[in-house]
Image (cartoon, rainbow, N blue to C red):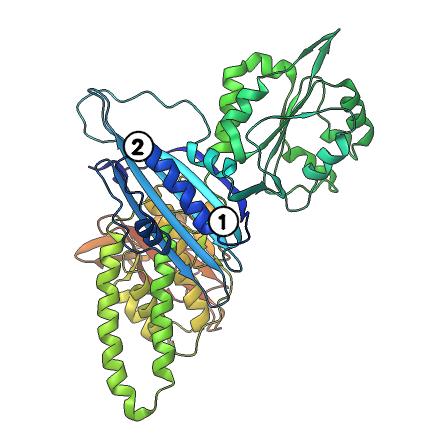
Amino acid sequence: MRASDLEHVPFYSTTFEVAAADGADALWGLIQCVRGWICRKWPEVPRDIERWSRFKVGTRAELDVSGVAFESALVQREDGSVSWAGTIRETFREGECAPREWRTSVGFAAREGLASGTVSVAVSYADYSGFLGPILDEPQASVPGLVRGIVECDWLEATTSGLPASLHAIGLGAGDFDAFWRFASKPGRTTPAVLVSPKFDGTVVRHALDVRALAAMLGTSARVYYSIDQDFCAEMDAGLPNLDLRCDGGTVRVYAPLPRFERPEDARRHRFFSFARAQELGEEQLLAILHRALAQQPVRTGQPLGIAEIRSELRVTRVIREARRIETLSKADAQRQIDEALDLSLQLEEENRQLTAQLSSSWTLGTNGGTGAGETVELPSWPKTPEAVGQLMVDAYPERLDFTERGWKTLRKECKASTELVWNALRDLACVAHGLYASGARDIEGEFRARSTFEFASNAGMMTRKDPWLMAQYRDVYQGRELNCEAHIGKGNGHSKDRGDIRVYFAFDRMSGKIVVSSCGPHLDNYSTRKIH
């Protein structure tokens, strides 16, 4: 088994903004940072500009060498927005230990043009499974060299929540409280702010931890502040709008993103460690806690897309454009163009199989083609029926979504929901639920509801499960395998014929790795609803 087939261990994750220093192409500046970083580690990786230009536009760059593999994808939309993603996989072998793969995923998103945008970097690792030998020690927490290179390069200006990105702890003295608090209380701030306050023992100033070590672990994942100045502490006591937000006496406090300081109850979100508690934990454990909470979290929803999402968007866009083009043709040309479209569909299906075969089973959740999960999507007029929508979604996500024979039948004969509602439900199964099941998420129901406007239930209920007759309707067959399709998502009460009502019953088929839909339409009978029918 390859390491890329395993669930990788998160090592570091960050998101920040960049702008080209000359106002030109920030994405190319980012590519140059990747090129310099990987070529210093692996001198045998080609450096020529032509190959790295292909890496930028998402075509085959021919950069792979023994121990290093590259892939990338780019989408440029009609509104001028751009998304790019690249992944570099490095395999290291040391003595008799199991080979370890490091995966560095880089994303870039720009609203207009390429002069500036949002960058995400996520680094993880996995040891080869089934290797008869010891494994390497866990790596020490640090800021990846690629992140350092981006922040320190001359052709990019990196910022975190509007301030110049810093890899070092920032000292605060007399007169600095107003500037610090403007950042900490800034509406929409996405970068955590960590304040390490001083504890004064006579003339001796003590901190609960080494602020330089903390900054060296967190990098752009958080801004680290500290003070040794009693005047700053006095300014903070006098200037705070709510004393529940104070940080003094050696306390270490994390001011969480998206502050709502005008709400008194918001203070509870901004966790802190008193000096006494920090002493109980010890510096090593406290540093580990902060690193795990702030620098090892997945990239947040709404940030740059991953390769899988960009390639899915490209496939769907091509199908939609072709369908719109056919719709405008005269009737005399329609049949000929439909034949060509069918040929294109077969080509897209083959291309999808080739692309998705190379992708890792873990991917960024909560994104789908630039649209947040659960939002209403304006559909073109061509998907006239629920069955047509289902077929389009299976064509767009062939490795994630499919229907049983009964599932297709319910789309044709029983589903009364609007095509827009069917689209959104199936899209959230393919783009949200599939990733949760495939990655083995612990709280699938909770995480799905956080990313979708559809309700989610993992089973039919305790009383229903005691009734064999009721449970029989949740069993279905897919490719000769029996599936339990109790899990369902929905909107409305599910019993009316209103076009805003829907229930989609499904199972995650581990053999094929797909979400398999067994029923798309009205609510199936359960213990609570059996008397209604």
Q: Judge the density around disc 2: few (<14), some (14-19), many (≥20) Cα neighbours within 10 Å.
A: many
Q: Nearer the viewer, residue 400 or 455?
A: 400
Which residue type does callout 1 highlight? Gln
Q: Which residue is mark 2?
A: 126
Look at the image and tell me in which quarter the C terminus lies.
bottom left
Q: Is residue 530 visible?
A: no
Q: Secondary structure at mark 1?
A: loop
Left or right position of 217 against 518: right
Q: Judge the density around disc 1: few (<14), some (14-19), many (≥20) Cα neighbours within 10 Å.
A: many
Relative height, residue 120 to residue 136 (above, below)? below
- Disc on the earlier residue, 2 or 1: 2
Residue 273 image position (x, y, % from top left)? 62, 22
| Residue found 18% across the figure and 27% down from its top | 131
Q: Which residue is mark 1?
A: 303
Relative height, residue 253 to residue 277 (above, below)? below
Q: Report, in whole angstroms, how far the alpha carbon at label 2 lies from the one at label 1.
A: 24 Å
Q: Nearer the viewer, residue 461 or 349?
A: 349
Q: Quarter of the image holding residue 530? A: bottom left
